[in-house]
Image: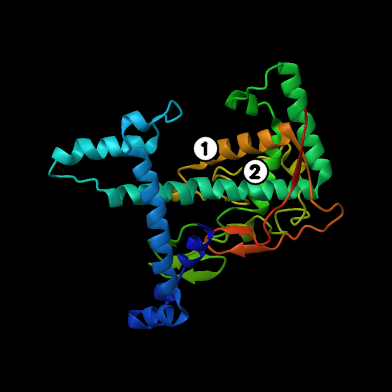
Amino acid sequence: MFELQKVGSISSSDLFPGGLGWFMDFVSGRHRRLHKLFGEVDTFLNHIIDDHLKNPEEKTNQDRPDIVDSLLNTMHKEEQDESFKLTIDHLKGIIQNIYLAGVDTSAITMIWAMAELVRNPRVMKKAQEEIRTYIRVKQNERIDEEDVDKLQYLKLVIKETLRLHPAAPLLLPRETMSQIKIQGYNIPLKTFLVVNTWSIGRDPKHWEDPEEFIPERFIDSPVDYKGQSFEMLPFGSGRRMCPGMASAIATIELGVLNLLYYFDWRLPEEGKYMDMEEDGNITVVKKVPLELLPTLYH
């Protein structure tokens, strides 16, 4: 999916009018890669749908209804409605959007969080102590969202990860609705605008030691990721901000919480430098895959 996002990002056709952009994409091999990836993704999505369409007697108790089942049920109900037709292709598009915009970006953020924690043992130890102390006092390893709200340092860790490593470095494109002026620059009507949220989160004008991973910087700070603080916009702002923000945060917090509670983590080679180079386009991933060794806590 990372390759799909890279190939499906801004292309020459988006920047050059007429056939010039199309020709540049053709010569660069972009069209060929897109067709190849389309076939692979289409096969993957067909497998998901076919699995949900199997006979009831083939299903096990583990197969609980999910969003794909709901969409299939809706599609069957709408078959009699001539005014609206939900097809398998529509279903594939919805599943792909959910994966690329939700699952994929949350996984990327969790990878960056674990990478920063291993690079900063002090922070990881402090987060683990908070989590393990809370669960020990609670005397129950079952964690729900109400418990996460009490783990304040974990929330600071997630905030700092989103500041340094927003999954999408550029927000969705905007278009000006009128002529405007920003910092002395005249921006004409219908100008195509892209906000660099990656750069905003590392701006030394707003952040002290912007390249350092310091969760404590958010203690007693009004700056948040919910679109009201322009020093940090990992989910965007306004009417076009990410609609899946709450789901993403819950997924990331619970995921990192479980990883830190049940395991201690280290690099395969002690003392080895961790390469934090970035790669990607629509999303920014860790160029060198993260490899860690877990040790069971209990």
Nearer to us of marks 1 and 2 is 1
> For the point 76% across and 50% down, which residue is it?
213
Between residue 218 and residue 115, name the one nearer to us. Answer: 115
The picture quadrant where one finds residue 155 is top right
Q: Secondary structure at mark 2?
A: loop
Three-letter amino acid code of the residue under disc 1: Ala
> For the point 53% across and 49% down, which residue is it?
104
The picture quadrant where one finds residue 156 is top right
Q: Position of residue 228 (x, y in %)?
A: 55, 44
Disc 1: which residue: 246
Screen quadrant of the C terminus = top right
Q: Position of residue 56 (x, y in %)?
A: 32, 30
Q: Residues within 10 Å of mark 1 (few under 14, many from 20)?
A: few
The picture quadrant where one finds residue 173 is bottom left
> For the point 78% across and 57% down, which residue is it?
274
Three-letter amino acid code of the residue under disc 2: Val
Answer left or right for 149 relative to 12.
right
Answer left or right for 245 relative to 50.
right
> For the point 77% across and 41% down, which residue is it?
216
Disc 2: which residue: 223
Q: Position of residue 234 (x, y in %)?
A: 57, 50
Residue that protrudes farthest toward the right in the picture = 271
Q: Secondary structure at mark 1?
A: helix
Q: Is residue 72 above or below residue 148?
A: below
Q: Which mark is residue 233?
A: none
Q: Is residue 176 visible?
A: no
Between residue 151 and residue 141, name the one nearer to us. Answer: 141
Structural distance between the alpha carbons of marks 1 and 2: 17 Å
